[in-house]
Image (spheres, helix red, strand yellow):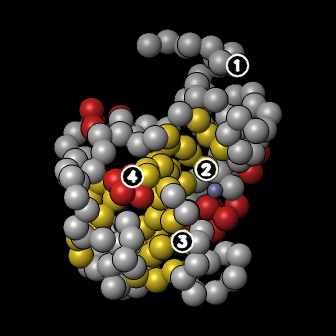
Amino acid sequence: MTRPPYLSDIPGFRKVYDASCFCGSVQYEIGAERPLDAKFCHCVTCQKLHGAPFQWSAIFAKPSIRFTSGAANLTYWTPHLRTQEYDLPCKVSCATCRAPLMDEGRNMVLVFPTLVRFGGEEERRRFYPSCHIFYERRCMDVPDGLPKYAGHKAESELVPERGGGGGGEGGEGGA
Ligand SMILES: [Zn+2]
Ligand SMILES: [Zn+2]
């Protein structure tokens, strides 16, 4: 807990966004204008852990994130150990309301933009995904024109889009 994102004091850190869990006991800040990448993930793990048809995540380098409250009120799930013991990579949740907060890797964290307090639509759009991943496992079609990978981004086949207002695959559609 002596490294980002668990440090509250990071030299040169300049807050751009605030974020918090559902109950508010955990608060963190983002010190970058926009994520390195953002995705909608339709994998079964995300569906189960989020209780949602798919997950919206945004990737940041760890020093772009700092907890300002509740860093001692976190609970972990470490998939490769199948325990709550902290080891990387792991999934981080609020210990009170159990809201998923982030997936912590070795150098990056994957945060969930639905926890971020955006100042408006323009700010929210900076976090808009570049693609859908694990789209083959989807609960629903999302005809938004974004690239849709069967598995991991750029390492799997693209899945043709279907559904929506009768537009063809990859078509621009109406404005
Ligand atoms: Zn909470
Ligand atoms: Zn996933």
Q: Which mark is residue 3?
A: none
Query: Is disc 4 placed on a helix, strand or loop?
Result: helix
* 1 and 4 marks in contact (CB < 8 Å): no
Determine which residue is flagged by label 1. 169
Residue 58 screen position, x and y as percent: 46, 48
Instruction: In the rendered structure, find residue 41 and report the number of the disc placed on it.
Output: 2
Q: Secondary structure at mark 3?
A: strand
**Mark 4: few/some/many CA within 10 Å (<14, 14-19, 20+):** many
At x 29% / y 54%, what residue is drawn? Answer: 30
**Neighbour tally class for label 2: few under 14, some 14-19, many 20 plus, Cα within 10 Å:** many
Q: Is residue 138 visible?
A: yes
Residue at 24% of width from left, 76% of height from top? 69
Mark 2 beta carbon near ligand 2 (under 8 Å): yes
Q: Position of residue 71 (x, y in %)?
A: 32, 79
Horizontally, is 110 left or right of 141 in the view?
left
Counting residues from the N terminus, which is met first, the one under dot 3 or under dot 4?
A: 3
On screen, residue 53 above or below 24: above
Query: Which quarter of the picture shows residue 68?
Result: bottom left
- Label 2 vs 3, first from the N-terminus: 2
Distance from the alpha carbon under mark 1 to that under mark 3: 35 Å
Looking at marks 1 and 2 on the same chain, the residue that comes earlier in the sequence is marked by 2
The residue identified by callout 4 is 113
